[in-house]
Amino acid sequence: MKSSVIDVPRKYTEEDLFGINKYQKALCKFIKHTNTPITIALQGEWGSGKTSLMNQLRWDLCDSEGAIYFPVWVNTWQYSLMKTPQQAIMSILEGCINQIGALNPNERKWNESKKKIGGIFKKMASVGTKIAANTVGIDGGLVDELFNAEASVDSDILQLKNEIGKLIDEVLTVNPSKQGFTFYIDDLDRIDPPVAVEILELLKNIFDLDKCVFILAIDYDVVIKGLKSKFGELTDKNEREFRAFFDKIIQLPFSMPVASYNINTFLVDALKRIEFLTDEELNNPQLAEDLSEIAQLSVGCNPRSLKRLTNTLSLISIINNEVLEEEKSDANNKLLNFAFVCMQIAYPYIYNQLSEEPDFKQWNENIAAKLKLRKLTEEEQDSLNATEEFDEEWEKILFRMSQKETHTSNRVFQVSSLLNKIAKIINNDEMLGDIVESTMALSAVTNLKAFDSAPKKSKGKSVTYGIWRVARTEDNKTEVYKNGERCPKSAPVLRELCAELGLEVNPKATTEELRNKAIKAINALNANIK
């Protein structure tokens, strides 16, 4: 058993669990037959698998037997560590050139090129010192300084391009089986957006050379942020200007096909590796379908989020087995744990409200007032009443909660569907709050939450019925006493107690469910006596 799934890009030797191979092969075929120069942008949010795809492309195009390209790999974030923006840009440029030159078998020619390029670099560095006191940006930035209309600068850039072109030709001349270079520019979305845009411009202007294919891992949102100093905030009126800049640099945008990812295969494989599910459960198609549905309603198809989800479930499973005095969880309990961890990752604000008020079907105007939620207009009321997801009072409160955050507001229908799915799994409105509270007690250990004061501890419950005393401690453990003696095995005696109380219980009910059911029944009896 492995207790975690590491969050690293997929290597070419690893199985394609997300079903992306068909897209990879199509993109690879396109690159093999493309005219050059060309720049391809792999677009997708952080963690969507851009680096993994680049690894596969590099293997197919450069490293496998019969490959026709040389690789140049640049991790822009690593090149920019502990450097000013100007230094980072020059370092990335130098890194690209050195990787090309290292492939030149003629050491004398490579040394000559290095001297010429070094001289040009000095001039470029002196230009950079002129703007060292300012933030690098599109207006007045290093690229504008380098590529302005002055003849001397134009001459230097032309000379640099010529030297790089010669290097490329020399390497390919002695390696006729290769037809060019593929440049893999990774992690642009991890550095400051204005600097990322500067790098894009620099690479486009200097490496716009025959036999060069650029593959960039960058999201369009990063470009938008990097261009704000030039075009202002993105609006409907200026969107065309942002798009025109992007199109000028990028000839082929490729959006990561996250919506087509086969997350079922990944989830089953990951949950099997951490032993969260048994072999029998893994072979249950309904359970696999439920897991997939919950994931789609929350974390979606982002590989990084799915890996975090798996690691959280692994820890919860270990806690459940090693710390809590519980029987082995059944599939239903595991499904609930899965659902609440998904909510914790995807919708932290809603998750935190659930931790405060777990009986969500009882959410009402008191909750709305406590959270200072805005009132719904009559039109909104009518619109929500017409939808299945928001026709009940608690669902309308959920709708209003979701407006607190942009991400949650944009996915409000998924949030409602997820909570309704949880209610369906529990299938007991009377016990809903207790079951939600006890289940969330496990996932709370991995919750990111800033507290102004110490978090509230849930009070332990203790009730007495004849010779019985049933307690739920502050850390959610179960204690059962019979004739004043503590019973070491809680589940069997709780079944006995439930039988005395005339309660019907599921043969597969956990200790937790039996305890909550018994406590609720005893409280009701005591209330009637009073």
Image: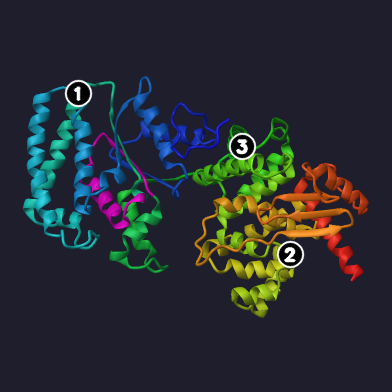
Q: Residue at x 55, y 54 (%)?
A: 447
Q: Residue at x 62, y 61 (%)?
A: 457
Q: Amino acid at mark 2?
A: Lys
Q: Is residue 100 left or right of residue 69?
A: left
On screen, residue 522 above or below 97: below
Residue identifier under label 2: 361
Q: Is residue 511 left or right of residue 278?
A: right
Residue 93 quadrant: top left
Question: In terms of secondary structure, where does tag 3 sit?
Answer: helix
Name the spot of residue 59 as percent of width and height, x first. Answer: 39, 28
Q: Is 208 part of what is drawn in magenta? A: yes
Closer to the camera: disc 1 or disc 2? Answer: 2
Residue identifier under label 1: 173
Crowding at mark 2 (Cα within 10 Å: few <14, some 14-19, many 20+): many
Q: Is 456 part of what is drawn in magenta? A: no
Question: In terms of secondary structure, where does tag 1 sit?
Answer: helix
